[in-house]
Image: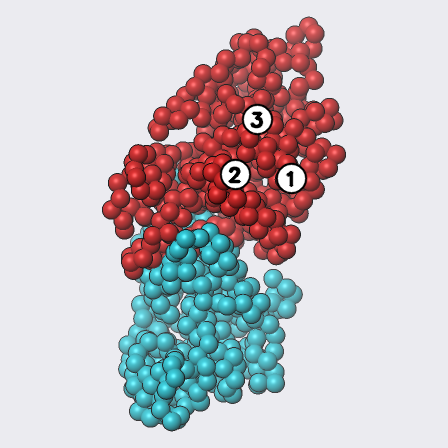
Amino acid sequence: MPSTLTLAPAPPSEAAEAVRLEVRRFLAEELAAGTFTTHVDTWLSGVDPAFSRKLGERGWLGMTWPKEYGGHERTAMERYAVTEELLAAGAPVAAHWIADRQSGPNLLRYGTETQRKEILPRIAAGECYFVIGMSEPDSGSDLASIRTKAVRNADGDWVVDGAKVWTSNAHHSHYAIVLVRTAPADPTARHAGMSQLLVDLSLPGITINPIRILDGGHHFNEVVFDSVVVPGDMLLGEEGAGWHQVTAELAFERSGPERILSTFPLLAAFARRASTDAELATLGRLSARLLALRQLSIRIAAALDRGELPDIPAALVKDVGTTFEADVAEEIRRVVDVPASLDSPDPLGRALAEAQLHQPGYTLRGGTNEILRGIVARGLGLR
Amino acid sequence: MSSDQDLVVQTVEEILTGHQPVKPTADRRWDAELWAELADAGLTGVGLPEEAGGSGGELADAVAVVATLAAGAGAVPVAEHLLVAGPALLAAGLTLPPVDEPVTVGVSGALRVVDGRLSGTATDVPWAGVARHLVVAADGPDGEVLALVDVGDLAATDATNLAGEPRGSYVLDGVPAQVGPVGELRARYALARAVQLSAAAETVLAWTVQYAGERVQFGRPLAKFQGIQVQLAQMAGEVTAVSALVDAAVQRLDRGEPLELAAAAAKVRAGAAVDVVARLAHQVHGAIGFTLEHRLHHLTTRMWSWRDDAGSETTWARVLGAAVAGDDPWPALVGVV
């Protein structure tokens, strides 16, 4: 394999296994106490600020960040174990997910000292939530074609006009990191002239409109910016370096266990009743696929611990992983006869319904699989 | 990979350079010359301890030898010998035959051991008629046992797999046997095939990428067409996933932890990747890859066969599924590897 695609094996981590068991105990207690119920794809749909604060109290958010910013200076492998356990249990982690996964690391990397000191401890406490401001109504996979623009005014502040879409849980969030044009588009340098702004979602001129997905749920939004004045010191990183920063952010966005485990609660519901040869064979096949993906995802966590930014392997894992997420429901359907319905008295029927209605999202969000395969092809030296 | 394994790989590759891959036929059932060269270089004892007559080295070294020979389509029973029979015999406390005499393995058929003698039929034996010794799982008086017999003078049926490699049967009629605990013979065999599948799939991907870069149609290399890039990226996804899981299963074996479920997962995943990798490789290679003139068949026909050996994906998936099924599937699953 070309070295761009290979990942070194992860060394075993006793610390990760120890925290894994702590999280497992916590989740068993919470489930027993009825503070949450298991659902499919809860990192999109399971918004529960009280639950997020509990995780913050236990030190399970901002785990890898420096202590001076409210972090816990633990390894990416430990964080991997925590996030994996939360996803496997179908716990409500959506409120803090984006902030903990990518906005915080983005601030650590590119933020000013003031931005870090003010915001990171609140994220780590499970109190401050973020949305991703990348896609626009006319810019999906072709992210470099964005039109939302920010212009400096006489006071040195940014005046932002435009709209961002698919902003998950913007209506529950405090900040957006918004990719904007700070210089006019240049056809000869498509990736130039973009910057990231840290935008307080309570600023005047911001409108958040719901966009409902197939199960009727309100997770997505359109966020409209109408001459929004963003203080000049809320530029994130360098003016003009937005594309480079977004690429780095995507390595975090694409590499985690949520790209393989969104439908695990469905697989678990199936595993609890699988007994015939055909059911056990299906369960075994899906388990083998999941185990292989998990090894890859763990290797990515280890690469992050080594300070690498494995963006190409992350694209590969997300492609294969999200395809698996979608296949889980189809493979199970082939061996059971349980109608999918959100109103089903059978937990398997409800999980099938949730997995089915969320299925189109798995292979779109965070970069479509077509875009990801293009990145893998680049890793293979084909383009 | 350590420098020891680099050296082992380099030695095997140098030997392979002098050999065109062999498609076994009735006249030439295996590459005896290749085996002799490997044995002369001490490579048929890698990973087996010196005090037992082996060449020493670690499991990882033996895996490197097997993977390199799989990638080079070497028509020799090295996987069976180094990763299955050899370590299974040692684990059972039995004496290894001299390491230059090929030992193969049989896990299907109906066999029984009575008073130290093996009787019955061993079916689907890789390299039947070629190997000097055979290690099998057989019924003993108190459950399943492992038995080692000398088959050097026994006739085997001449059935073959899709690559033309021997997959015959032996009829055994009270053949004197060394007998010990069966241990994880089946899991070792499954993992050995997964190691070979992983190495072959990686090479098939490399060949396909290379071909797509060289073959020009419509005025540009195939590799520049987005449709082809998508196929190659899908192959890379499969190859990478298989390789990571097989590595993890090998590490588990190296740590001496129970192997069955990890081997099951590795065999299922590697077997499942064969369809995608071989099918897309042939699609990208076009008609020339569908002929015996082109090298591709050496690996794709072996991959189609290796996935059937040692228990199919369905058989091992049931084993893995039964272990994961139940009230608490997640801890069961993450405990596998």
Chain represented in red: A
Q: Position of residue A377 (x, y in %)?
A: 47, 43
Q: Can see residue B22? A: yes
Closest to the camera, between mark 2 and mark 1, is 1
The image's colouring method is: by chain
* Element at label 3: strand
- B288 relative to B212 in the view: left or right: left
Comparing marks 1 and 3, which lies closer to the viewer?
Answer: 1
**As drawn, B153 above or below A189:** below
Chain in cyan in the render: B
Circle 1 is placed at which residue position? A59
Horizontal arrangement in the rendering, residue B316 relative to residue B44 (left or right):
left
Q: Are marks 1 and 3 on the same chain?
A: yes
- What is the three-letter code of the residue carrying label 3? Phe
Residue located beneath label 2 in the image: A254
Label 1 secondary element: loop
The amino acid marked with disc number 1 is Gly
Q: Is residue B325 left or right of residue B78?
A: left
Across and down, in percent, residue A132 comes to: 54, 26
Farthest-out residue, top: A154
Residue type at mark 2? Arg
Q: Nearer the viewer, residue B302 or A280?
A: A280
State how far apart marks 1 and 3 are (Cα). Answer: 19 Å
The Cα atoms of the two marked residues, 3 and 2, are separated by: 17 Å
Q: Residue at x 60, y 18 (%)?
A: A200
Q: Secondary structure at mark 2?
A: helix
